[in-house]
Image: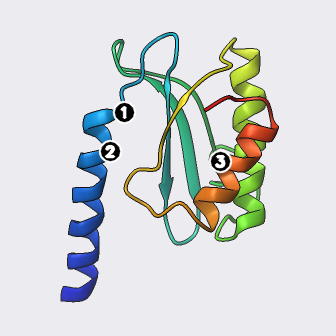
Amino acid sequence: MERVKSKTVRRLRRKAGVRKRVIGVPSRPRLTVFRSLKHIYAQVIDDLAGRTLVDASTSPIKGAGSAGGNCAAAAGVGKTLAEKAKKAGITEVVFDRNGYAYHGRIKALAEAARKGGLKF
């Protein structure tokens, strides 16, 4: 149990370091990612207004996809998010990996969002 707590604390420290430098403004909002064991969530946020502009996830509540503990589901979330962002008139974002390493599901989501037309 102590190992899990220390992993979470280390991730939160990395997250704080990233958030010092990454700020979402109306011209370039922040694309942030949260990864749980079963699902992956992504949202585009305007930090100055404190609003979520677009979101997508594998959660059945949102209805964006199937169970999402894998890279294929994360890529689906990235594609869905890019489509929603284009409809909302968002083409450029800054990527906030939220303290997670840029590999696996996080990388799959980011690459799918890029293929969908988002620039970051």
Across and down, in percent, residue 68 comes to 67, 64
User: Left or right: where does residue 101 sit relative to residue 12?
Assistant: right
Name the residue type under label 3.
Ala
Q: Mark 1 and mark 2 in contact (Cβ < 8 Å)?
A: yes
Residue 5, compared with residue 91, is above or below; it is below
Looking at the rendering, which quadrant does residue 89 occupy? top right
Q: Is residue 1 visible?
A: no
Residue 104, compared with residue 78, is above or below; it is below
Across and down, in percent, residue 83 comes to 78, 29
Which type of secondary structure does the marked residue at label 2 adopt?
A: helix
Across and down, in percent, residue 36 comes to 49, 65
Q: Residues within 10 Å of mark 3 (few under 14, many from 20)?
A: many
Name the residue type under label 2.
Val
Q: Quadrant of the N terminus?
A: bottom left
Name the residue type under label 1.
Val
Mark 2 to mark 1 CA distance (whole Å): 6 Å
Residue on which disc 2 sits: 18
Q: Nearer the viewer, residue 90 or 69?
A: 90
Which type of secondary structure does the marked residue at label 1 adopt?
A: loop
Looking at the rendering, which quadrant does residue 91 occupy? top right
Mark 1 to mark 3 CA distance (whole Å): 16 Å
Mark 2 to mark 3 CA distance (whole Å): 16 Å
Residue on which disc 1 sits: 22
